[in-house]
Amino acid sequence: MVDLDAPTPQSPTWSPIRHHLGGGWSANNAADPGVLTTTTVAVTAWFQPSPSGTDPHRYVFLLFNQSPEFVTQRQVTAQTSIVNWNLATFAQQVALGSPIAGTFMLVSAQ
């Protein structure tokens, strides 16, 4: 998940900000096959959206087929900056291809 509007939608100089990066997702719940779950430790742990004092921010979720290169990648670690993260470059480096699904949400401070 990335924030496209940090620090503000009018001046997104920190964007995109990486709020979550993880793998190992699957739809294994027979009772609810539309729900994705994972037991894999995230590359970037969930960082809750919290835009304060600005207009709403756009948060984008993208889903890719996981490549073998994603599992062994070292481009992004817990120490890698989350600011100005280039998802397209990362996807190319680890052979993710194009997204297979996506959605977004608007989040405001209120």
Image (spheres, helix red, strand yellow):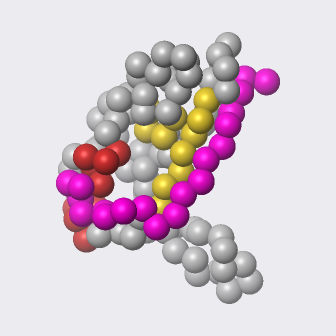
Please tell me whether residue 87 is drawn above or below residue 15 in the rendered image.
Answer: below
Image quadrant in which you'd find residue 30: bottom right
Inspect this view and state whether residue 95 appears: yes
Between residue 47 and residue 41, name the one nearer to us. Answer: 47
The residue at 71%/27% (across/down) is 108
Picture coordinates of residue 54, whole percent (x, y):
65, 16
Specify the quadrant that holds the C terminus.
top right
Q: Which residues are magenta?
A: 92-110
Image quadrant in which you'd find residue 98: bottom left
Between residue 103 and residue 67, name the one nearer to us. Answer: 103
Inspect this view and state whether residue 40 appears: no
**In the image, residue 99 lies in the stretch drawn in magenta:** yes
**In the image, residue 49 lies in the stretch drawn in magenta:** no
Picture coordinates of residue 46, whole percent (x, y):
53, 44
The residue at 59%/35% (across/down) is 58
The residue at 41%/19% (across/down) is 13
Picture coordinates of residue 7, whole percent (x, y):
51, 18
Q: In the image, is 51 to the left or to the right of 44?
A: right
Q: Number of marks in the image?
A: 0
Please tell me whether residue 60 is drawn above or below residue 38 in the rendered image.
Answer: above
Picture coordinates of residue 48, whole percent (x, y):
60, 36
Between residue 24 and residue 5, name the one nearer to us. Answer: 5
